[in-house]
Image (spheres, rainbow, N blue to C red):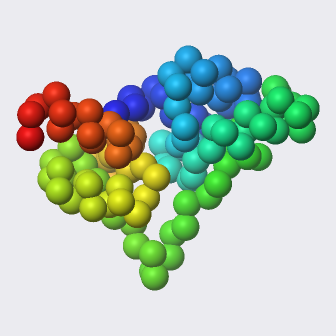
Amino acid sequence: MCRIMDVMFTICDLSRVIELAYDRDFSHIPVLDKNRRPLGYVEVSKLKQLWESGQANPNDKVSQYMIKFKRTSSEPYTLITPLTSLNELELFLQTNIFALVTDSQRKFVIGVATMHDLEQFVSRRGF
């Protein structure tokens, strides 16, 4: 699971996102507002293409390249917390790229979980 310090805020420069992506080998990085509210994410592979082709400036803000989360009544937010069962998390990850793990009141993001993270966790625990 990605720690909260491994997310980007809308004001972060693109160069910091690229640095984090290379350092941590991330495929997606969540983007939060100043109050830690999830706004969207950046897809690292697309960002790297723009960066390498010169279409992205290192001083650009990450918000310019962010894919916004859909928040509609037809697509409700699924609450994923540290207490969410592994089965429920697996079902969620079958149709979503990653899960933002939040506190039970959804006031702040604790981390990010991917299917790969879940598979590693299950493998280490021998489930």
67 left or right of 76? right
- Viewed as shown, does residue 59 lie left or right of 41? right
Q: How many marks?
A: 0
Residue 105 quadrant:
bottom left
Q: Quadrant of the C terminus?
A: top left
Which residue corresponds to the image point at 73% horizontal and 24% vertical from the top-left? 15
Expressed as whole percent of the image width and height from the top left, the position of residue 9 reads: 59, 37
Q: Looking at this view, name the residue that lies furthest to the bottom.
A: 74
Q: At x 27% / y 41%, what residue is drawn?
A: 118
Name above or below for residue 28 compared with residue 22. below
Q: Which of 11/66 is in front? A: 66
Task: Say which quadrant the N terminus sits in.
Answer: top left
Q: Position of residue 119 (x, y in %)?
A: 26, 40
Q: Does residue 87 lie above or below 22 as drawn?
A: below
Q: Nearer the viewer, residue 23 or 6?
A: 23
Residue 71, x across and y down, in percent: 51, 69
